[in-house]
Amino acid sequence: MSGTMCGRERLLAAASGQTVDATPVWFMRQAGRCLPEYRALRKRHAFMTVARTPELAVEATLMPVDRFGVDGAVLFADIMLPLEGMGVDFEIRPGVGPVIANPIRTPADIERIRVVDPEEGTPYVLDALRLLRAELGERAASLGFAGAPFTLACYLVDGQSSREYPRTKALMYGEPDLWHALMDKLTEVTLRYLKGQIAAGADAVQLFDSWLGLVGVDTYAAKVAPYTRRIFDGLRGMAPTIHFSTGTTHLLGQIGETGPDLVSVDWRMPLDEAWSTIGPRRGIQGNLDPTMLMAPWPVVEAATLDILERAGGRPGHIFNLGHGILPETDPDQLARIVELVHGGRYG
Ligand code: CP3
């Protein structure tokens, strides 16, 4: 790497729209299933044990930092963790994802949801972030995260991963008061959770709205964006914020208006077009298609260079994939991308 900045400085400079010595890079789901060292850790401990034990969570968090030299270290955790403190039982089933024992569907279910502070609901996440900040030093920024209210609602109401989340959308369209009550509680818990993470040492935070692509423009404006905006308004000035979603080319302008510092975009629209849609006031994160990593290196190399060229050296770009790493990804492809992004200076 030819740069003069440390990873933490590089990522945080880009996140606040300042010039950098090279484009910062990290990967969503980097701390997981594609790494043999992670699989070995998971043979010894269950997923929730790793998440609940700060030393183990930090060990998993540091694996990709050590191996790839990424500029961001995303905490090993899951978007579902805060639900436990809210009184919602779930489990994470390998190969399936989160499963909720008793999905939230009635007014009484929503009434029962507890609005808690992270010190009470997820103290181990805050402890892990404190430990991570101490262990990382300057080599990477520590990244906290939370699930966005809409995506959390999808799991809460439908109960597990689904293509369409029909029960969630039925509630959203058909029972506006209940939807508001649910989103209001999820928003409050998420805002407190992210504030707690920043206080505990997260240098920046990402809000994951993974299933947002399921909603249309008007529905987004009426039923989702006000809650997202409340979260970004509440965090302003505390640490840089990143909004993540996928399949949301139709919403990019509106997403920018909710107020994140950066908008993470998927591969469906070229990066420069997406950035024009979002506008120059925000940074952008992305946008390599994770399935492209299954192709030979020259294909990945050309696509990576194309993204850097489209960013054109403008401040405010963080290189990433458009969604999480697939488990079958060859880790060497990721190492090569980091090297290329760090070495390729554009502009
Ligand atoms: O590197 C990282 O990003 C580490 C931290 C992280 C995990 N989950 C660890 C994890 C993050 C940021 C998440 C976010 C997350 N979790 C999202 C948003 C991101 C996205 O992909 O859209 C969502 C929707 C979830 C819910 C969830 N948890 C799913 C869909 C799964 C996958 C189930 C599977 O095995 O396919 C999980 C489990 C999970 N979360 C794993 C990891 C490493 C795999 C579990 C294991 O090791 O058995």
Image (cartoon, rainbow, N blue to C red):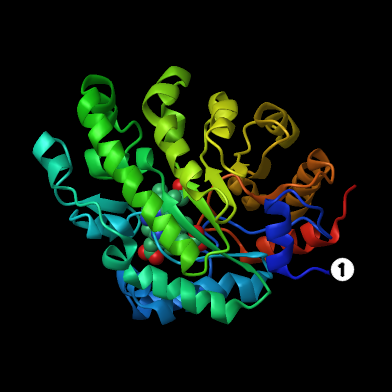
Label 1 Cα crowd, 10 Å radius (few <14 / some 14-19 / many 20+): few
- 226 left or right, relative to 64: left
* The furthest residue to the left: 108
Q: Give the residue drawn at x 70%, y 36%.
A: 281
Q: Image quadrant of ligand 1?
A: bottom left
| Residue labelled with disc 1 | 2
Give the quadrant of residue 282.
Answer: top right
Is 143 or 193 nearer to us in this picture? 193
Q: Describe the element under mark 1 as helix, strand or loop.
A: loop
Splitting the image into 4 quarters, where does residue 7 fall? bottom right
Does the image show residue 296?
Answer: no
Residue at the far right in the pictured view: 347
Judged left or right of residue 224, residue 285 is right
Q: Nearer the viewer, residue 72 or 167?
A: 72
Amino acid marked by disc 1: Ser
Q: List x then y, in percent, for residue 65.
A: 62, 72
Residue at (68, 59) in percent of width and height: 12
Count of numbered marks: 1
Q: Quick check: 56 left or right of 69?
A: left
Residue at image point 73% right, 57% down? 13
Determine whether 87 is above or below 211 in the image: below
> Which quadrant does the N terminus fall into?
bottom right
Residue occupying image coordinates x 18% and y 48%:
113
Horizontal relation, residue 213 to residue 71: left or right: left
Camera-side residue of 106 and 345: 106
Q: Position of residue 116 (x, y in %)?
A: 26, 57
Front residue (pair 72, 221): 221
